[in-house]
Amino acid sequence: MPFADRLNNVETSAIRELFKLLGKPGIISFAGGFPDSAMFDVEGIREASQLALSQDPGSALQYGATEGYNPLREQIASFMAHKGAADVKPEGLIVTTGSQQALDLLGKTMIGPGDKVIVEGPTFLATIQCFRLYGAEIISAPIDADGVRTDVLEALIAEHKPKFVYLIPTFGNPSGATLSMARRKKVLELAVQYQTLVMEDDPYGDLYFDEAPPPSLLALSAGVPGSRQWLAHCGSLSKVLSPGLRVGWMIGPEELLAKATMCKQFSDAHTSTFAQATAAQYLKAGRMPGTLAKVRQVYAERARTMGRALKKELGDAITFTQPGGGLFFWASLTGAHGKVDDGAVLAKRAIEKGVAFVPGAPFYAANPDHSTLRLSFATADVAKIEEGVARLAAAL
Amino acid sequence: MPFADRLNNVETSAIRELFKLLGKPGIISFAGGFPDSAMFDVEGIREASQLALSQDPGSALQYGATEGYNPLREQIASFMAHKGAADVKPEGLIVTTGSQQALDLLGKTMIGPGDKVIVEGPTFLATIQCFRLYGAEIISAPIDADGVRTDVLEALIAEHKPKFVYLIPTFGNPSGATLSMARRKKVLELAVQYQTLVMEDDPYGDLYFDEAPPPSLLALSAGVPGSRQWLAHCGSLSKVLSPGLRVGWMIGPEELLAKATMCKQFSDAHTSTFAQATAAQYLKAGRMPGTLAKVRQVYAERARTMGRALKKELGDAITFTQPGGGLFFWASLTGAHGKVDDGAVLAKRAIEKGVAFVPGAPFYAANPDHSTLRLSFATADVAKIEEGVARLAAAL
């Protein structure tokens, strides 16, 4: 069949292939990028869905506006205000089918074949693929423990004049890195100076363990004149409430939202109104703060456990920064004492020992660091984490 | 902002602008393309959503496979079997976020800039726009009361070598026309002969009033050797159960489904598992036949009422074929006795008289017939239909 040329730019991910092995009985998985099902507030979602169907079934089950269900847009605006972005109006955001769709709509709206897009190296794999499907040439900006290196980012923007810059500034996937306050301001200044759109993807910002991370670029944009015109932001209920609802959102300049809405009209007409009405009732019921507190506590304990276990079991064969939030450890194999220093080699051996994780190389759009690996602590409990890390040590 | 060139190919539809006027108090609307909210089986959907959350909340609220939630894929396969396509396997279909997304995935998978696609003239507006966003050049094949004219279609396929042919063979939108049995077989033969993919969009086939329409192209493909390899089919629960669930599906050759799944992974990861699990429970509970029987009866009465009223009130100023199913009358203004013969002019006057409908011209990708109009009988009750047609006569 004569498929479109754009399909030549992407491939089904190596990670997806790896996931097929996870069905093996007894495997402990650090591979996923998803929250723990056991933590879903099923009762709260049940009540919310019932209210959605009893209070306004006509709206919850009918076609809706492409921009989103208004009561949900109001709740999301209020949710963002609690996170420091007080000036987001309900009409200043659109609801998307998960934040993956926000990325897709950004690509559809902005990227033509050969256009350049700057991302962090490493970054979320599905973003790279999503943008490549629209013909983007992906440029990687390096990161360190304080997030993207803004000096290099500036040089890359000046050189490549990208359509936009895509960042996960807080508890990045896969890096776990959080952009420092000084660099956040610098990114906003660069957006204004070079008139270049910046997309802030923020699925993990609410999942902090001890102290809160710096405010989002969105929240900080109020203090950098002109930056709001060059800033888009996407968020999601997937990591904090339920991925299965597929409720995300995009905030951005009016002109961008108008074009994205037009594209969304022809992508899926609108996001499930049943899911949107359920999410709106959930947020309105005020259960989110309690849910977040619980999730943070459980993930914090798992992250501490994994950090301790990695140090104890793998010693100087591995280096990593203890994450302050999110779902991931990002680590490098040092090759000390002649041990394995390639994440992909270790991943294969690890499966044989009964533990799974994702090697880091595929997260780079270019120049992969093969020593890296990503370990999720979200879905295994404390005992499984200890056992899994012991198996990892055995594989090493 | 430097948007992608593809946005130059489309515009927000004239129809969408018209819809903004519908908020005017007291307007009777024949404009919508949606089912009547009053007919939603709210109780059945409530029970289904509760079962989804009680039986397997982990799956209903977690990330799911891009291809779809397996229990729903099984139910859809069984639903298709009841409609005569007995050989559709669960793994032979993917779940989409409404059938709009099936069209989008077809476009993303198949269409490159300048590729040609053949559609009926007139056809569903959002299809034309969706395909144009991927750079398609749209070719129109004319229809008559028996659906697309297959003699012209064959000549157009031979001349243009399109990427695919898109048809709504049963109770078409906006035409209401149903492709005859002989032409259905001819379309399948053409697909094989010219090795050209045909997409059958079938949102309305279940909404027949008296006798059932001919079997779908999908059902008939079993009798035309080789045709299944060149046939895709999309369906939806939107017109028969609830648009707000956003549950549709695409059936097609394995290779096409694999590519569409890859594209969907980067479009929205997967369709809401909560909506999918709810739909699966609904279908499993066996409520669909009763719901369909009720919907058919109510729409049939409304269609009869509208047909009678149009004849009585507008006489020879209008011509139309009485629809045997679906949601629409497709009519032409004759201009008899010096009356208005332009659908757009009448639409404006009609709004002033308190009735809304959609002029037909925008449904043509090329060479619009300005005398046409589309009247939906789905959302107004019998009394409102009579009153609305009387207002239409006054506007004329």
Image: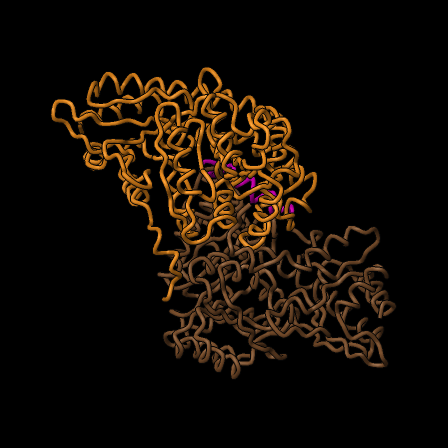
Chain colours: A brown, B orange
Q: In front here: A33 or B61?
A: A33
- Residue A218 visible (yes or no): no
| Magenta segment boundaries in residue numbering | A41-58
- Residue A60 visible (yes or no): yes
**Residue drawn at the location 56% of the way across and 69% of the way down:** A168
Q: Position of residue A133 (x, y in %)?
A: 52, 58
In the rendered image, the vertical position of residue B30 relative to residue B132, given as above or below: above
Q: Position of residue B298 (x, y in %)?
A: 43, 21
Quadrant in the rendering for residue B376: top left
Q: Position of residue A242 (x, y in %)?
A: 61, 52
Q: Is residue A196 left or right of residue A79?
A: left
**Residue drawn at the location 15% of the way across and 23% of the way down:** B336
In the rendered image, the vertical position of residue B326 relative to residue A236, given as above or below: above
Residue farthest toward the right in the current orientation of the protein: A394
**Residue drawn at the location 62% of the way across and 35% of the way down:** B280
In the rendered image, the vertical position of residue A159 relative to residue A111, given as above or below: below
Residue farthest toward the left in the current orientation of the protein: B338
* Quadrant showing the C terminus of chain A: bottom right
**Residue drawn at the location 58% of the way across and 44% of the way down:** B256
Q: Is residue A72 left or right of residue A19?
A: left
Judge whether residue B209 is colored magenta.
no
Q: In front here: B332 or B227?
A: B227
Dominant SS of magenta comes to helix
Q: In front here: B188 or A373?
A: B188
Q: Is residue B253 left or right of residue B386?
A: right
Quadrant in the rendering for residue B315: top left
In the rendered image, the vertical position of residue A103 relative to residue A121, given as above or below: above
Q: Position of residue A67 (x, y in %)?
A: 41, 51
